[in-house]
Amino acid sequence: MSNGGKYRSKAIANRLIGLSVSYQRDHLLARGLGLEHLRELLVRLARPLLRQGASLAYGGHWRPTEDNFTFDLLRLISAEQEDNSLGGPDTNLPIGRLYNHSPWPGYLDITPRIEAQWINCCRIVRITQQRAGIAAADVVADSEARAGADRAIFNAAVTLSAMRRLAMDGMMIDIPDVPSPETVPPIVARVMLGGKVQGFQGFLPGLFEEALVTLESQRPLYVLGGFGGAAEVLAQAMLEASPERPREFMLDWLIAGNPALKRLNELSAHFALPPGGRGSAQGLDEMFQFIEQARSNLAATLNTGLDDTETRELLKTPDMSRAVQLVRKGLEDRFGLKTVAE
């Protein structure tokens, strides 16, 4: 297809939109949906952003598993780049790319061959232990990353949390033999669906922590709660009229279903967090404060660009088309995103 005749807003060009998405099989099956429906939803959300020059941030891993969306996004970007190159003089904005923020030790799985294969589509941003603020004396050697030692487990969780925080702030990366550092832009808005409430890595469920850093930064947060997972838990908590704190935001409940979290919190009594770090209890308390705030002022807390009725609908709808429509409308209000042909 040709890009001729499209309206391409420059307001969103070069912006970075965060995607928080993971496959929760049982939740989708209960709604008559499967993995392919989730892929379709992801593409429908991502494609108009890419076509208007916005880039995507997704912290997915690089293992070739069925439910890994990293490669789905890379294939989409590659196809859009190829299509864009045939667009002729009417194509005045480049296709966005993927920023893959990858914490230690996860980035050790990324081989030079993988990075070279996707170099035109993706910038891999490695979050080292040092960048996470871990003192030099406490840094674990890469060769010991998978050994299961206490310090390695703790440092991995600290680096994962730092990755989520640094992605919101943006950062500079020094490149050997290049005089000026590379700028990695901050995430300006986040779209989330799915997510684990149990069986997660780190101090908090990943989607909860990504929601927390987004809300702290006062950036737009679009929670698609109608498709299950941690996004549904978060949406229901915000829509709840009572002052009660849901069990999913209580540390004892999370630990009861996650032995790895229990061990991590035991290690927290022996190892100090670096500056800016926070443990599970603090993170859950601060997340619930935002939930309470949202219960009294939902649209403003989430900064969606939608009115209260539309924001509530976004948090509940199981209709993919309507969810995509609402996210686009919110991004149009916040960043000038315009509908483009799919």
Image: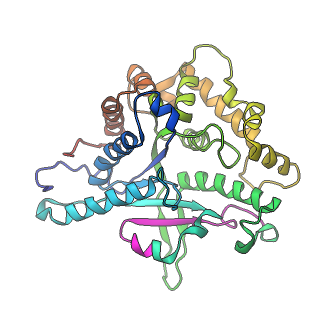
Residue in view at x 44 percent, y 22 percent: 312
**In the figure, is residue 151 to the left or right of 175?**
right
Q: Is residue 87 left or right of residue 34?
A: left
Q: How many marks?
A: 0
Q: Residue furthest right?
A: 270
Residue 68 at x, y percent in the picture = 48, 53
- Residue 94 visible? The answer is no
Q: Is residue 285 visible?
A: yes
As drawn, 13 above or below 261: below
Residue at x 36% of width, y 36% of height: 327
Q: Does the magenta segment cover residue 127?
A: yes
Q: Which image quadrant is residue 167 in?
A: bottom right
Residue at 45 percent across and 28 percent down: it is: 226
Q: Residue at x 57, y 44 (%)?
A: 210
* Pick the front one: 284 or 153: 153
332 to 317, vertically: above or below = below
Q: Position of residue 67 (x, y in %)?
A: 48, 50
Q: Is residue 125 magenta?
A: yes
* Residue 235 location (% of width, % of height): 52, 27
Frontmost residue, 220 versus 34: 34
Q: Nearer the viewer, residue 331 or 121?
A: 121
Image quadrant containing the N terminus: bottom left
Highlighted range, magenta: 115-135
